[in-house]
Image: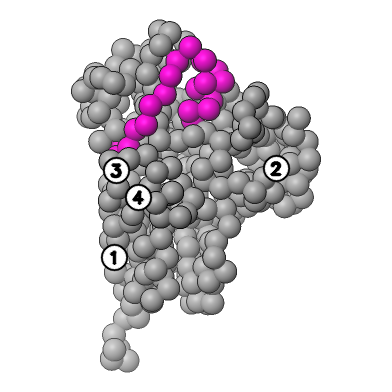
Amino acid sequence: MNDDSPALFTVGTRGSELALVQATATEATLAAAFPDLHFERRVIKTTGDRRTDVSLAEVAKAEGTFDKGVFIKELEQALDDGSIDIAVHSLKDLPTVLNSRFALAAVLQRAPARDALITRDGGGFESLPAGACVGTSSVRRAKQVEFLRPDLHTTDLRGNVPTRLEKLAAGDPYDAILLAEAGLIRLGFLPEIPTIDGPEPILNMPGLFATRLDEHVFFPAAGQGAIGLEIRADDQRSRVLAESIGHADTWLQITAEREFLRLLDGGCHTPVGVISSLADGLLHLHARVFPEAGGPPQTGEAHGTDPITVALALFQSLT
């Protein structure tokens, strides 16, 4: 590279529409902060993207990894060989404990963390008839459906967000599906701020409606709604760039949420929901954890100022 050439920084991302939107947001924020750098994107197809014919659990079993680890393996390989400098993830897809060669360096400002129920008739959970089929690839969501409405049943749903919406629109076997509110907002299917009370029409998808679920009733995943920036642990340049665009309040919240998962010895596949909020510098955490052996979920709550301490207090409060 010539001395007068702009320094190159390569951003790695999955190729789904949502992943590309998140990569664009990351690149734009980096470019605004570092106008003298040249940013290049590398789109990488992961195992989870290639294998949409079977459940995430089956893909993970074949790969010998956690369920959501199938969405990061190839991105981490690209970090390892130096072909990318930073990997952009939906944070809930990133395993709680990373290989020591890698580090979560920063997160962008979080979008709403709630889940959304999508139906064809504009009804919410209470309007689904007994025996209705709810599509989801998330064990956490499936367990909460079973807990809140044991008369419903769930079935596996794979594919990117538009594909999942199209499957619901097409009818059988799904009567409803569950998706993250953040993804629907980032892809333009919902406005960030609701314009009406109750079910809202999915934009550009006639006949579909979304109900944003109260997070104190339907607990979101740890890290849901946040964009995570993963780097090589020893790459100081990438760390400085990532940290410079990181969002401090979101970092505080996700640090507590991910530490709680670590204490549970859980990962992205674990059926656990966590809510965090910040008010006047005080961090509040609530959780719902479904035991692997079955039975009713445990719940707990804690608050404080240090995320690690609050996560431990939440873990100890589970009953």
Q: Would you say the residues marked 1 and 2 are in contact, meaning their CB atoms lie under 8 Å apart?
A: no
Residue 284 point in image, percent of width and height: 70, 38
The tag earlier along the polypeptide, 4 or 1, is 1
Please name whichever residue, 30 or 53, is drawn nearer the observer in this view of the structure. Answer: 53
Asked where in the image residue 248 lies, by quadrant, the reply is: bottom right
Which mark, residue 42?
Answer: 1
- Above or below, comparing residue 233 to residue 151 in the picture: below
Task: Identify the element where label 4 is drawn.
Answer: helix
- Measuring 68% from the left and 38% from the top, which residue is drawn there? 285
Start-end of magenta stretch: 141-162
Foreground mark, 1 or 3? 3
Q: Name the amino acid, label 2.
A: Leu
Residue 145 point in image, percent of width and height: 50, 22
Task: Identify the element where label 2 is drawn.
Answer: strand
Q: Would you say the residues marked 2 and 3 are in contact, meaning their CB atoms lie under 8 Å apart?
A: no
Which mark, residue 283?
Answer: 2
- Residue position for label 3: 52
Please name whichever residue, 104 or 199, is drawn nearer the observer in this view of the structure. Answer: 104
Q: CA distance from mark 4 to mark 1?
A: 17 Å
Foreground mark, 4 or 1? 4
- Residue position for label 4: 48
Q: Name the amino acid, label 4.
A: Gly
- Measuring 53% from the left and 39% from the top, which residue is drawn there? 221
**Residue 195 shown left or right of residue 168 in the figure:** right
The tag earlier along the polypeptide, 1 or 3, is 1
Q: CA distance from mark 4 to mark 2?
A: 34 Å
- Above or below, comparing residue 115 to residue 90 in the picture: above
Task: Tell me, yes or no, if residue 201 can be seen here.
Answer: no
Q: Name the amino acid, label 3.
A: Thr
Total numbered labels? 4
Q: Would you say the residues marked 3 and 4 are in contact, meaning their CB atoms lie under 8 Å apart?
A: no
